[in-house]
Amino acid sequence: MTLLLVVGRGLLRRAPPIKEMRARLAAVKWALQKCFSTALRQDVVITDRATAHRLLVRGGGGGAFCNRPPTSAASSVLSRQRHHNIGSAPYGPLWRAIRRNLVSEVFHPSRLRLYAPARRRALRGLLADLREQCTSSNVALAAESMHAALFGLSAAMCFGDGVDAGRVRAMADAMEDLIRSLVGLSVFAALPALTELVYRKKWNKLVALRRQQEELYLPLINARRGQHHRPSGEAPTYVDTLFDLLVVDDNCSASGGNSPKQRLTDGELVGLCSEFLGAGTEPAIAAMQSVMANLVKHPEVQEAVRREIDAVIGEDAEEVGEEDLGKLEYLNAVLMEALRLHPTVPSLSRQYDRVVINQAHGLNFLFTRKVIPEDHIVLDGRRASAGTTVQFPLERLARDKAAWADPDEFRPERFLAGGEGEGVSLVAAAGSAGEIKMMPFGAGRRMCPGMGVAMLHLRTSGTSWRTS
């Protein structure tokens, strides 16, 4: 009896408090409900270009296709989908405020011109690195050099000049570790509460990586906060534009509360800066790698790019000025063809939010899940439940034989005068004839806000191929 009492007291001492146990059970209950409701929904894949235009561009005007499925962004996962960045925020006041700030205060052409000196420094550093590698070993690791140059440029745009090179490398390494920890763990996005309980070690690693990011970013953020008022004519940093930004808490608004506007917290600032660095580097590097792979496969194309650059700036010129980038028509055609064949993301995802579309065509339904009886949208005579995830496979849409001759072939000439790609825009307008030939940056209200700066960086870095 004494032994049983001793063991019983030990078990009671080790047992978690009642409140903690109730919280864990509530988390498991919510996760299971979420899991079952998700399993009962269907996915839809859009493979018709006219339907994609109708749903994303014209249908998106009502807000039905302006939301994305739960994201695995670290800020969203760790806050259980309460704190968001531009890519993950639901369509609403918060998303509009932070996206408008980025587009008008950083990515506007008049602001981008102020970053020209930083771009020149990044390009010169990239060229010097490539030359040094070629001199020492006759082999240049172009992708790694471009990644370092672009990440450094993004860090300068985010935090200003003078960020220690060692800290920039540490931020890049932390970003890579964070991305690797999230890849393949989509359950983090859909079921964060269950993930925290079941995948405890992975969750703790994610928390540690996020803490490391905060330790790297917050000193830079606080340093900029201390010199918030910059001299006129100086390029604004991204974090500068966030200090005075007032946003509405979407969680409070959604629950019917009267939410006052408030400034962003330090955690939200870290999340937005992390998104800025990642989105400003990783997609561009993926696009560059696809371009370089095609240049290696087609040396005649690389030689044509070299001849065009020499003709525009002269064979003896060291670098291409940004004022000459618009004259490089063949280089632009190479970039467009690479983006058509190899979009930086394989698929675009949206969620239905409410009934605004009565009929559409060209749908492939994946009936691996049942439709549950709830608010629905009728598509091509078939029911699709509200909240259904809709996939737009970008590569498949851009390789439509009805739009392109030999769509699987790498032919930059198709984007020159007289080709079937002449005049093709990366932005699908609502008033257009319903034609989307390619959308590597998405379409509709949720298309990538950094498309302009991404193309500028691609053209600028593309001139380095003349040297490499």
Image: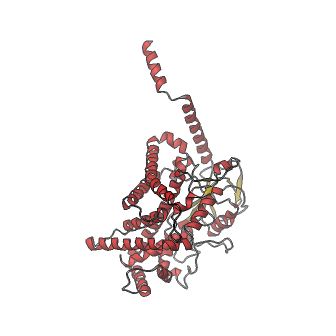
Left or right, 305 with respect to 441, comes to left
Give the residue displayed 53% in from the left and 55% down from the top: 269
- Please state the horizontal and vertical placement of residue 68, each as a whole percent of the image: 60, 57
- Please state the horizontal and vertical placement of residue 279, each as a whole percent of the image: 50, 62
- Please state the horizontal and vertical placement of residue 223, each as a whole percent of the image: 47, 57
Which residue reaches farthest top? 1
Q: Is residue 340 visible?
A: no
- Considering depth in this image, is 198 or 108 the residue closer to the camera? 108
- Please state the horizontal and vertical placement of residue 365, each as a whole percent of the image: 62, 58
* Quarter of the rendering occupied by the N terminus: top left
Query: Would you place residue 258 above or below residue 130 in this image?
Result: above
- Considering depth in this image, is 352 or 126 the residue closer to the camera? 126
Left or right, 410 with respect to 404, comes to left
Give the residue displayed 39% in from the left and 76% down from the top: 465
Image coloring type: secondary structure
Give the residue displayed 68% in from the left and 47% down from the top: 255
- Considering depth in this image, is 31 or 100 the residue closer to the camera? 100
Q: Choose top left, top right, bottom left or bottom right for residue 140.
A: bottom left
How many callouts does the rendering have? 0
Query: Would you place residue 37 above or below residue 162 in this image?
Result: above
Left or right, 353 with respect to 271, comes to right
Query: Would you place residue 429 above or below residue 278 in this image?
Result: below
Q: Is residue 94 visible?
A: yes
* Quarter of the rendering occupied by the C terminus: bottom left
Give the residue displayed 65% in from the left and 72% down from the top: 429
- Considering depth in this image, is 30 or 145 the residue closer to the camera? 145
